[in-house]
Image: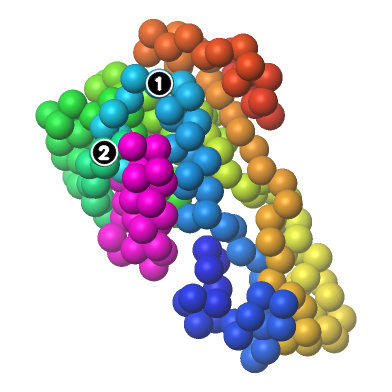
Amino acid sequence: SDDPVASGLVASLGRPGGNTTGTSNLSTAMEPKRFGLLRAVVPQAAMIGVLLNPTFPSAANQLREMQEAARTLGLQLVVMQASTDHDIDTSFASLAQHRADAVLVGNDPFFVSRRDQLVALAAHYSLPAIYSFPEYTVAGGLMSYGIDLADAYRQIGIYTGRILKGAKPADLPVLQPSKFKFVINLKTAKALGLNIHPQLLATADEVIE
C-alpha cells in the first residue's frame, strides 16, 4: 500500500492493530524526487505532463504531491487521466498538443502492465519521461526512480513466514522501504538528444547502455 493509515488498513505504522500488516511503498512521497530528476535531465522544462489512473486508490494523493512538487520547482502541470489503452494513447497525443516538455507517469499497477505502450508513446512523441520502476527503463524508458521491488517482496515473504509461525499481524509494524533504485537508459537519452551530466550518471544505481 502507498499509505495504509490514510486508507484505513491499519491504525498506525508502528502498531497496525487488527489483522493487517505489510509494507508501504511510499510512492507519493517520492514524486518530488522524480520531478527533481526530470528537471536535472531537462533543465529547460517549464511544462510537465503527468499521467494518472483515476481508478487507482492513491491517485488523489499522487496528484496532491505532484502539484506541491511542481509549485516548489516553479513548473506548470498538464494532468492527464488514463484507465484504458485508448486513454493512454489520447493522453500522449494531448500532451504533444500542449507542448509538454517532459512527462511523469504515476505509480500504478495498470501502467506497469502497459509499460511497453507507454515507453513507445514517449519515444514517438519525443517526450523525456520518468517512471516509478526499473521495468520501464529496461523496456526502453528514459529513467526510473522508486523502491526496490525485489527487496519489498522479500520483506513480505519474511513477514508471511513469521505470521505462519504464530506472530500476530497487529504486533508487526508496517515496513517502510529502505532500498531505492535510480536507473537511466543512455540509449534512450541519446535518441532524445539529451546529454546526461556525468555527476547525475554517477548517482544512478544502474545505467543501461
Query: Is any part of residue 180 visible from this angle?
Result: yes
Instruction: Please say which color scheme the image uses.
Output: rainbow
* Region of the chain picked out in magenta, as a range: 51-74
Numbered tag placed on residue 43 in the rendering: 1
> Does 100 sit above or below residue 83?
above
Residue 88 vs 140, above or below: the answer is below
Q: Is residue 52 rendered magenta in the image?
A: yes
Q: Is residue 105 in view from this perspective?
A: no
Residue 120 place in picture, x, y as percent: 34, 27
Q: Amino acid at mark 1?
A: Pro
* Quarter in which the C terminus is drawn: top right
Q: Is residue 66 above or below residue 170?
A: above
Please state, as top left, top right, bottom left or bottom right, where the N terminus lies in the image. bottom right
Can you identify the residue that label 2 sits on? 76
Residue 192 percent location from the top left of the image: 37, 13
Does residue 7 sit above or below 88 in this rendering? below
Nearest the viewer among 85 and 105 is: 105
The amino acid sitting under disc 2 is Gln
Residue under the image location 15 percent in, 36 percent down? 94
The residue positioned 34% from the left and 50% from the top of the image is 67
